Image: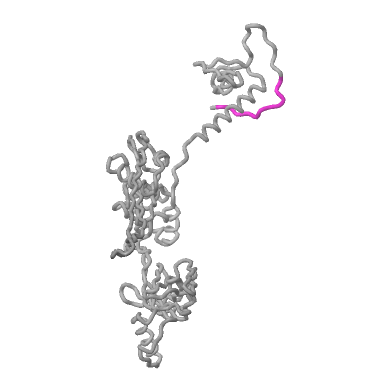
């Protein structure tokens, strides 16, 4: 144990000593420590650290200012060691990586009509739109021949929504409206009353209201300006829930089941350990990598909502597999921090092929029977770039991998090919998801 004290001021001057007489503040440290390098203060390290001796060591005669210096040095050493500790691994809430069984959403879908468009609706070739308008008018007591209906201000759409768990009758939800015909834009349109059905065929909500598309599509005289996607829109709070879906998160034996979003044995074991530490009176068991079963005691069964709320806030460190996700369509590559690379040498060189075609007019001589022809002239050039090589040591991290590939100047699409080659060579310790 070390003693800490505040540094007094001003320090008293040291007494003079004779030639060859040891200093009053010099303390021998075994083994001897090295001297400071050139360019430093010239003070021996052993002399400075001697002030940080344990209290149970031999008695040392130090001046008052030396004891204060000793406390300051000890504080500095402890502060340095505290900052030198590696950062703790990030943990997440249990509710961010898992869900309670029985608490789930349901999808709804319906067919509807959007009216009020400014000439950007379906054409007369969209027979389903014409038939829909005729059927709607007939329900209002109006009979119109289908061939007399013009639908340029109307568009047939599909309406989708997600019914959240525990939603009650009278609540509202957002709906997404998508054109299924050849309408150019749904800007300024209004969705007419559309029943939304579940997978069982029952109507759970009714949608209606003006659309918001977050863009525009204007044109005229052969020119057109468009921003964002104008054939898909939303109706905020546009669906009124008419029927509730029963949701149950408690099983018959007063149990709660937690389901991990990504099944993993290690993560499931850590979840069980975290729950047991926070709630020692509960019976917790992992049935498989994605299912954790909790049996409630008599006290917890009285207020299960409070218990689940406390469970959701528990901190858990999930275990993530090393994975590389590539998208060849967009050239996107995502590599997580657990990817490691075995010792490998990477050489990358490219071949650039350029094909250029020009058209020349071949004119026949005068008074000849030849005809003027347009002859294509094709020129092909191939340039091969010299291969460059980098070497990665064993256990190289994703940062080293990215730096090495950037040194080669590879493009995202070349990077995908290199990662696949590393995986085929057994040097990439990660899963590749395409």
Q: Is residue 67 above or below residue 207?
A: above
Task: Depth check: give the residue in front, 317 or 130.
Answer: 130
Instruction: Give the magenta part as a residue range.
Output: 2-12
Residue 111 place in picture, x, y as percent: 37, 77
Horizontally, residue 220 falls left or right of residue 323, namely right
Task: Depth check: give the residue in front, 288 or 330.
Answer: 330
Task: Check residue 286 for magenta coloring.
Answer: no
Which residue corresponds to the image point at 58% horizontal and 16% vertical from the top-left? 27
Q: Please, which residue is most extreme toward the front here?
A: 367
Which residue corresponds to the image point at 49% horizontal and 76% vertical from the top-left? 188
Q: How is the image coloured?
A: one colour
Q: Is residue 13 above or below residue 158?
A: above
Q: Is residue 100 above or below residue 51?
A: below
Which residue corresponds to the image point at 39% horizontal and 89% vertical from the top-left? 137
Q: Is residue 249 visible?
A: yes
Horizontally, residue 85 falls left or right of residue 128, namely right
Horizontally, residue 48 falls left or right of residue 204, namely right
Q: Is residue 280 visible?
A: no
Q: Main secondary structure of the magenta part?
A: loop
Q: Is residue 179 above or below residue 381?
A: below
Residue 67 place in picture, x, y as percent: 63, 23
Task: Depth check: give the residue in front, 221 or 286.
Answer: 221
Residue 4 place in picture, x, y as percent: 60, 29
Q: Quadrant of residue 390?
A: top left
Q: Quadrant of residue 160?
A: bottom left
Residue 413 place in picture, x, y as percent: 36, 49
């Amino acid at each position: 144990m070390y003693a800490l004290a505040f540094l007094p001021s001003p320090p008293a001057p040291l007494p003079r000593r004779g030639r060859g007489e040891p200093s009053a503040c010099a303390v021998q440290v075994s083994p001897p420590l090295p001297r400071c390098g050139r360019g430093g203060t010239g003070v021996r390290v052993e002399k400075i650290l001697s002030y940080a001796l344990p209290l149970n060591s031999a008695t040392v005669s130090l001046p008052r200012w030396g004891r204060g210096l000793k406390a300051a040095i000890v504080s500095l050493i402890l502060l340095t060691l505290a900052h030198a500790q590696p950062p703790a691994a990030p943990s997440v809430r249990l509710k961010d990586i898992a869900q309670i069984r029985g608490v789930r959403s349901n999808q709804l879908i319906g067919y509807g009509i959007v009216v009020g468009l400014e000439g950007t609706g379906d054409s007369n070739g969209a027979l389903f739109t014409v038939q829909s308008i005729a059927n709607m008018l007939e329900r209002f007591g109006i009979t119109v021949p289908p061939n007399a209906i013009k639908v340029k201000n109307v568009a047939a759409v599909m309406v989708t929504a997600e019914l959240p768990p525990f939603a009650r009758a009278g609540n509202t939800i957002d709906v997404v409206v998508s054109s299924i015909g050849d309408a150019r834009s749904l800007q300024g349109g209004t969705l007419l009353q559309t029943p939304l059905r579940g997978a069982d065929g029952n109507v759970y909500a009714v949608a209606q209201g003006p659309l918001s598309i977050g863009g525009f599509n204007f044109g005229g005289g052969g020119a057109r300006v468009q921003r964002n996607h104008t054939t898909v829109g939303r109706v905020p709070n546009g669906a009124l829930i008419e029927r509730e879906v029963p949701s149950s998160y408690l099983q018959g034996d007063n149990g709660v089941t937690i389901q991990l979003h990504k099944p993993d044995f290690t993560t499931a074991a850590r979840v069980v350990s975290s729950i047991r530490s926070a709630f020692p009176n509960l019976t917790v068991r992992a049935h498989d990598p994605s299912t954790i079963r909790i049996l409630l005691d008599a006290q917890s069964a009285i207020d299960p909502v409070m218990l689940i709320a406390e469970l959701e806030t528990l901190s858990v460190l999930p275990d993530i597999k090393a994975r590389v996700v590539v998208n060849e369509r967009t050239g996107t590559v995502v590599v997580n921090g657990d990817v490691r690379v075995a010792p490998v040498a990477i050489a990358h060189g490219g071949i650039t092929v350029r094909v250029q075609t020009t058209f020349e007019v071949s004119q026949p001589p005068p008074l000849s029977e030849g005809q003027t022809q347009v002859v294509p002239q094709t020129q092909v050039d191939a340039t091969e770039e010299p291969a460059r090589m980098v070497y990665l040591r064993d256990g190289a991290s994703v940062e080293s991998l990215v730096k090495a590939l950037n040194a080669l100047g590879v493009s995202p699409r070349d990077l995908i090919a290199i990662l696949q080659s590393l995986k085929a060579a057994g040097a990439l310790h990660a899963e590749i998801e395409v």
